[in-house]
């Protein structure tokens, strides 16, 4: 049977080669010589029965004697991509022209202008067009036969280029589009049908005397603004012999009308056409992959001779992204992302275990059961024709070892999973050894209850190791590591949550890991060593649909709610902690330890964590830990820290520690892990938080008069009204000065979830600003926004300040007020005729810092009569009057900011009327227009020197001043 298949393949190859020869005989002499040479090579290879040595030698010669080309530099690639991106919004012929121009530059640089593609005796001469090359008397018979021509539009094509390297030639034809779906089969067929007509015209031109000295193209490049593919043009040669009235149709006519249908039907059923479509927007896109493929195709008579790209740890993520884009296309149904990763790695490293039938990839398991996956069958073939599937045992291990990295980012952020690099697992092992002794791997029962592919334990030997994971598919990813351990599927947050000595022998755990169940029963030494997922149901990083809602819904969550653990029960890694607390209590464990990688926030205290901390630290003591940047983990943001902590079980206690000292470490290339400093994590009670200090300044609600619901506009930003929301709008006092958005109590939230508004902020998470709490609101805002953020303090909570005198308080308040007025998150505006629920409102800016007389003088200067009249009928604003009381406390830095802010107002005032006509939504003609409006005025008009060279540097100095207050008065430690 195999012999028959091989013979049929040879017959098919012979037919293709003979057909190619018939076409090529109509070309120049050099084309005939090359084709004969290729057929002689193939015939010799077959005559020796497919001898592997000769086959290898043949491929080696083709590689060495292939097309010479040079890589396109990364700097030029950036310009190439930027030019395409800039024109992406343009549709039609103009966009297509940009695509053509950019690809011409690439092709000419890589091939035509490369000195090795020119005759040695004339290597300094740049290549020129086909026509001028031959008209100047140069021909392939001179010198050593090497030549190259620039891309040129000939015979109505989008471009032809000819490169001769003595034994092989690249004859490339290009087809460019504006913005089409090149990854769709129909679009590919439309483009290739158009190319077939061009090939026919070239063939007819050669038969008619070949005035332009053309050769039949052997490579097709098709590209639009963000995609491209390359195919072997030889597979299109048989189409040229179809019985069609070629003069009746045109290339563009086929693309637009799909006529004649004979070509479309043949293309649709052609199994030799499965182009690999490159996405230029892909983060791992490299245009040299396309140039290399074009060179390979020119050098190869058959696609099977192409050099495939090996997959390794350096490129596997980009390859996986391409697999998802081309092969699965979000249509492959899997139980989990882990199964998808496992499928990809299996197809890559054990490709023969799959059988492809149409659009179904059938995986045959070791036990002869099968799993069917829906895929794009054509793209499956194209993908694995481009990427290698042959690897050594060590290479397979390396690929499988980083399976966790391949979890799609959206899924990973949903579940909070992250992959642990080897260097940090080694560091964790040493930390446990320091606390539990050198023999802990032999002495303790070790349970990694979120094992994934065993990243934490794969490099070490344990006497009693148990690895459980949520997803069955992950077991196969780590099956080659610690093969003697007990690895099993187990949902740590849902399975056996009521586990006790009374039911353990009939539990799922006992069936999967009986020795582990016995260890719990007999109070054996046990350590829970894992990297639990990090995720929470409430997070600003969610999208508009709140995708994370439900991430923490499980049986442990319900138990924690029942036990009144509070908001921390929404967090996945706290649920992992709490499950161990329950096990310790249920089995009365006296030698139990926790060694977790996790977010450090659970130790920082506050209302969110207080009940959880009490439940955990009343049963466990903090032994030691180290903190490092989360960016050390794969695909994890670098703006927060990961804590590895070792906790040991203790008899129940009531007194909970208020601080924890940890080492701060970093992985330095070439040096390993270095200790940077020590950091104190403070467990602050809720009543000691800065946010509580601010809220306590608001009077009793019963003493405050509030607006009736629906009678005050609510905003989602400085200028945007928000009438409806899933959130009930906050209650808003009649005498309110604005609203302070103030989410959370830590440094992380301060950066992006702290803002001031001149009206009510629709989604709450803050408090209205009135005269009673104004001062504390301002200090709180300035301290949070002036903080110099770093990953180290990201989870630290702000505490109530301690002022040594009333004068110190007034000094901080004065500078904070000036700083707050001009911050980018200070959305202070004055708006006219705001429509809200079918009523019109005016929004006064009580944060305006200048006097009526200051603005009246400017209004008179520019003859803004209506503004002048409005000023006369209005009152001085609250902040102006407040600043008068604080003048003597203003620092020189604050005074300079006020000076330059006034100059900016003066120098931009003349733009207000004309820009108000163009941008009425910004209410530039309000006399008390706030700094947010001034910024908009400058962005649509011009920024004066007083702003760029005066205000901005002075504001930076003021920010440094306030940053000093943060530590001087105890807001942070």
Image: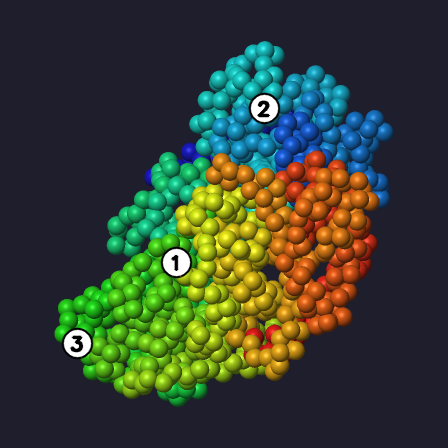
The mark tally for this picture is: 3
Q: Are marks 1 and 3 in contact (CB under 8 Å)?
A: no
Q: Residues within 10 Å of mark 2 (few under 14, many from 20)?
A: many
At 56% from the left edge and 76% from the top edge, which residue is drawn? 801
Can residue 101 be seen in the rendering of this structure? yes
Q: Residue at x 58, y 24 (%)?
A: 194
> According to the image, label 3 marks what residue?
501
Q: Circle 1: is it few (<14), some (14-19), or many (20+) Cα within 10 Å?
A: many
Q: Position of residue 273 (x, y in %)?
A: 50, 33
Viewer-proximal residue, 559 or 881? Answer: 881
Q: Which residue is mark 1?
A: 537
Q: Secondary structure at mark 3?
A: loop
| Residue at (61, 42) in percent of width and height | 832
Left or right for 174, reference 241: right
Inter-mark Cα distance, 1 to 3: 33 Å
| Pointers 2 and 1 in contact (C-beta within 8 Å) | no
How many neighbours does mark 3 have within 10 angstroms: few (below 14), some (14-19), or many (20 or more)? some
Residue 840 in the image, given as x and y percentages of width and height: 54, 39
Question: Mark 2 or 1 closer to N-term?
Answer: 2
Residue named by callout 2: 194
Q: Secondary structure at mark 2?
A: helix
Q: Which residue appears at 42% of the width and 36% of the height?
A: 7
Q: Position of residue 372 (x, y in %)?
A: 32, 44
Tag in front: 3 or 2:
3
Q: Taking 476 as reference, is 547 above or below it?
A: above
In this orientation, which residue lies closer to the viewer: 51 or 123?
Answer: 123
Q: CA distance from mark 2 to mark 1?
A: 53 Å
Left or right of residue 594: residue 121: right
Q: As rendered, which of 70 and 877 lies closer to the eye?
A: 877
Left/right of residue 20 with respect to residue 542 in the rendered view: right
């Amino acid at each position: 049977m195999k012999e028959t298949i091989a013979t049929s393949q040879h017959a098919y190859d012979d037919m293709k080669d003979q057909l190619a020869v018939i076409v090529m005989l109509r070309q120049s002499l050099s084309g005939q010589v090359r084709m004969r040479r290729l057929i002689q090579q193939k015939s010799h290879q077959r005559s020796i029965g497919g001898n592997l040595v000769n086959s290898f030698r043949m491929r080696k010669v083709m590689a060495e004697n292939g097309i010479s080309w040079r890589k396109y530099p990364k700097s030029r690639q950036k310009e190439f991509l930027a030019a395409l991106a800039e024109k992406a919004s343009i549709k039609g012929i103009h966009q297509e022209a940009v695509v053509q121009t950019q690809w011409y530059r690439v092709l000419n640089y890589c091939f035509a202008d490369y000195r090795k593609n020119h005759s040695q005796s004339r290597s300094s001469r740049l290549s020129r067009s086909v026509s001028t090359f031959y008209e100047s008397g140069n021909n392939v018979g001179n010198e050593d036969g090497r030549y190259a021509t620039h891309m040129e539009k000939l015979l109505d094509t989008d471009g032809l280029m000819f490169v001769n390297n003595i034994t092989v030639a690249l004859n490339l034809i290009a087809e460019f589009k504006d913005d089409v779906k090149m990854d769709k089969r129909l679009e590919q067929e439309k483009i290739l049908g158009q190319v077939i007509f061009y090939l026919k015209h070239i063939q007819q031109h050669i038969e008619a005397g070949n005035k332009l000295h053309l050769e039949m193209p052997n490579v097709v490049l098709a590209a639009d603004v963000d995609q491209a593919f390359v195919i072997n043009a030889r597979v299109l040669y048989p189409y040229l012999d179809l019985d069609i009235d070629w003069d009746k149709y045109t290339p563009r006519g086929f693309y637009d009308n799909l006529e004649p249908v004979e070509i479309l039907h043949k293309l649709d059923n052609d199994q030799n056409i499965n182009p690999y479509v490159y996405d230029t927007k892909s983060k791992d896109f490299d245009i040299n992959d396309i140039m290399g493929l074009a060179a390979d195709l020119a050098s190869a008579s058959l696609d099977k001779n192409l050099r495939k790209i090996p997959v390794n740890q350096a490129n596997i993520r980009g390859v996986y992204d391409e697999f998802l884009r081309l092969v699965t296309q979000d249509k492959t149904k899997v139980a989990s992302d882990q199964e998808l990763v496992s499928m990809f790695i299996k197809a890559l490293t054990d490709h023969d275990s799959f059988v492809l039938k149409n659009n179904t990839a059938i995986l045959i398991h070791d036990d002869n059961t099968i799993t069917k996956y829906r895929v794009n069958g054509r793209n499956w073939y194209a993908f694995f024709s481009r990427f290698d599937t042959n690897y050594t045992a060590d290479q397979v291990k390396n690929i499988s070892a980083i399976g966790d990295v391949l979890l799609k980012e959206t899924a990973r952020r949903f579940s909070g999973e992250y992959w642990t690099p080897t260097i940090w697992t080694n560091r964790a092992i040493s930390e446990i050894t320091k606390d539990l002794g050198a023999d802990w791997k032999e002495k303790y029962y070790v349970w990694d209850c979120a094992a994934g592919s065993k990243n934490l334990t794969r490099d070490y030997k344990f006497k009693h190791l148990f690895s459980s994971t949520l997803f069955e598919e992950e077991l196969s990813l780590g099956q080659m590591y610690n093969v003697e351990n007990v690895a099993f599927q187990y949902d740590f947050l849902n399975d056996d949550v009521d586990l006790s000595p009374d039911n353990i022998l009939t539990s799922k755990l006992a069936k999967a890991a009986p020795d582990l169940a016995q260890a719990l029963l007999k109070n054996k030494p046990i350590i829970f060593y894992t990297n639990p997922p990090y995720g929470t149901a409430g997070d600003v990083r969610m999208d508009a649909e709140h995708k994370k809602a439900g991430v923490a819904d499980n049986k442990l969550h319900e138990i924690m709610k029942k036990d009144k653990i509070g908001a921390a029960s929404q967090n996945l890694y706290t649920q992992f902690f709490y499950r161990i607390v329950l096990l310790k209590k249920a089995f009365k464990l006296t030698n139990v330890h926790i060694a977790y990688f996790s977010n450090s926030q659970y130790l920082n205290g506050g209302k969110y964590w207080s009940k959880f901390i009490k439940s955990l630290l009343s049963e466990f003591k903090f032994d030691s830990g180290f903190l490092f940047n989360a960016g050390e983990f794969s695909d994890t943001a670098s703006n927060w820290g990961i804590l590895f902590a070792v906790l040991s079980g203790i008899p129940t206690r009531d007194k909970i520690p208020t601080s924890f000292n940890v080492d701060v470490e970093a992985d330095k290339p070439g040096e390993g892990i270095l200790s940077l400093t020590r950091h104190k994590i403070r467990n602050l009670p809720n009543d000691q938080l800065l946010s509580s200090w601010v809220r306590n300044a608001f009077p009793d609600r019963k003493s405050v008069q509030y607006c009736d619901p629906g009678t005050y506009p609510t905003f989602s930003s400085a200028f945007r009204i928000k009438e409806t929301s899933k959130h009930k709008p906050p209650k808003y006092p009649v005498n309110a000065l604005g609203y302070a958005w103030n989410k959370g109590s830590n440094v992380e939230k301060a950066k992006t979830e702290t803002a001031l508004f001149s009206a009510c902020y629709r989604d709450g998470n803050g408090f209205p600003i009135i005269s009673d709490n104004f001062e504390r609101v301002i200090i709180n805002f300035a301290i949070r926004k002036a903080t110099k953020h770093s990953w180290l303090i990201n989870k630290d909570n702000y505490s109530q300040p301690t002022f040594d005198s009333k004068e110190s308080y007034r000094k901080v308040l004065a500078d904070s007020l000036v700083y707050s007025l001009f911050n980018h998150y200070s959305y202070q505006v004055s708006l006219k005729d705001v429509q809200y629920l079918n009523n019109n409102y005016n929004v006064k800016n009580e944060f305006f810092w200048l006097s009526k007389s200051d603005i009246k003088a400017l209004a008179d200067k520019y003859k803004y009569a209506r503004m002048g009249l409005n000023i006369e009928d209005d009152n001085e604003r609250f902040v102006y009057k407040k600043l008068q009381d604080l003048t003597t406390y203003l620092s020189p830095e604050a005074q300079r900011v006020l000076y330059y802010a006034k100059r900016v107002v003066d120098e931009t005032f003349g733009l207000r009327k004309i820009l108000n006509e163009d941008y009425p939504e910004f209410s530039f003609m309000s006399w008390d227009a706030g700094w947010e409006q001034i910024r908009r005025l400058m962005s649509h008009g011009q920024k004066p020197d007083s702003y760029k060279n005066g205000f901005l540097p002075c504001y930076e100095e003021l920010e440094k001043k306030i940053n000093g207050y943060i530590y001087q008065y105890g807001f942070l430690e």
